[in-house]
Image (cartoon, helix red, strand yellow):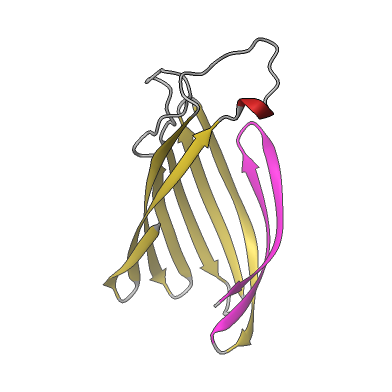
Amino acid sequence: FSASNRFIVSKNSNFYIGSSLGFFQRSIDYDLVVLNDFEQFPYTGYKFIDASIGLSYDKEINSSTHLITGLSLFHINKPKQTLQNNKDVFLKQNNNYHFTIIYYFNRKLQFTSSIFYSGQGKSNELVYGSGINYLVKVKENETLVLRSAFDIRKKDAIISVLGLKIDN
């Protein structure tokens, strides 16, 4: 289940909030598992709820510059993640933050620059990069976006992006 809402802050800015709630089941069927040393778990299955929330803000700074920023928090209820009788094993909260600035050269050509950070427990990543979008109007309220970009995941990878999306 998910829900979201947009709040108009002013003529040139919006605030968004969203949330999701998922119901899951985790189980083991010993007939389908081959183990060297058979280990009997205290539980053969359990059900859990997983909750997330997100916030975003966008602002048109001027006629050629647009700012988008936000955060999302996943697993905020830290659900149990083991078939063992151990209450210390749970899904750690995942926090994501993003910041994007879009510069419009004209009505069809955009330059984008963004930063994304994700952290969960001891794991984290930072991705930053820039790209070019070319917009093609297909119908009255449908735009085709051709995108090319390069992103860098700190200390790990260079990501090339070539894409196509339809905004409607």
Residue 51 image offset from top left, x and y in percent: 37, 45
As drawn, is 123 to the left or to the right of 62? right
Q: Which residue is drawn at the image coordinates 57% and 46% (left, top)? A: 128
State whether residue 57 appears in this view: no
Compared with residue 146, is residue 32 higher up or lower down, i.e. above or below?
Answer: above
Q: Where, quadrant-wise, is the N terminus in this rendering?
A: bottom left
Query: Which region is colored magenta?
Result: 141-167
Quadrant for residue 16, please give it: bottom left
* Residue at horizontal 42 percent and vertical 38 percent from the top: 47
Q: Which residue is more in the foreground, 66 or 83?
A: 83
Residue depicted at x 57% and y 43%: 127
Q: Quadrant of the C terminus?
A: bottom right
Q: Position of residue 92 (x, y in %)?
A: 42, 31
Q: Position of residue 83 (x, y in %)?
A: 48, 24
Q: Nearer the viewer, residue 10 or 107?
A: 10
In-image side of 43 versus 37 (left or right):
left
Q: Residue at x 49, y 41 (%)?
A: 117
Q: Is residue 81 above or below residue 145?
A: above
Report the residue that reaches farthest toward the top.
37
Residue 19 shown in magenta: no
